[in-house]
Image: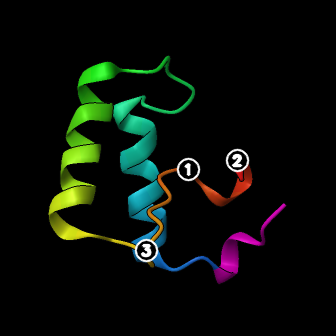
Amino acid sequence: MTDASIITETEQRRMAAVRRYDILDTPPDGVFDRITALAARRFAPLDRCFAMSPPACR
């Protein structure tokens, strides 16, 4: 488990927002998949990875 004292305030707020949206462990969503595919083609994030899960879930 991660020591809470080393997690920044910004990261704590981000993790709280993810929990508030209740989007972890949800079933696949075709609309979301299409939007992210469109964004990937438009902005070409070849070397980027966006993690929405808290560190404890990884």
Q: What residue would you read off at disc 2? A: 57
Q: Between residues 54 and 40, which one lies in front from this camera angle?
A: 40
**What label sits on residue 14 in the rendered view?**
none
Relative to 1, say whether 8 is above or below. Answer: below
Relative to 10, say whether 16 is above or below. Answer: above
Would residue 33 be found to the left or right of residue 3 on screen?
left
Upstream in sequence: badge 3 or badge 1: 3
The residues bearing labels 3 and 1 have C-alpha atoms spaced at a distance of 16 Å
> What amino acid does circle 1 point to?
Ser
Which residue is the extreme one toward the left?
42
The N terminus lies in quadrant: bottom right
Measured as percent of width and height from the top left, residue 25 is found at 57, 27
Identify the residue at horizontal 32%, vertical 20% (top origin).
30
Magenta residues (range): 1-6
Measured as percent of width and height from the top left, residue 27 is found at 50, 17
Q: Nearer the viewer, mark 3 or mark 2?
A: 3
Q: Nearer the viewer, mark 3 or mark 1?
A: 3
Upstream in sequence: badge 3 or badge 2: 3
Q: What residue would you read off at disc 1? A: 53
**How many residues crowd around disc 1 within 10 Å: few (fewer than 14), some, or many (20 or more)?**
some
Q: What residue would you read off at disc 3? A: 48
> Which element is circle 2 on?
helix
> What amino acid does circle 2 point to?
Cys
> What amino acid does circle 3 point to?
Arg
Marks 2 and 1 close (CB-CB < 8 Å): yes
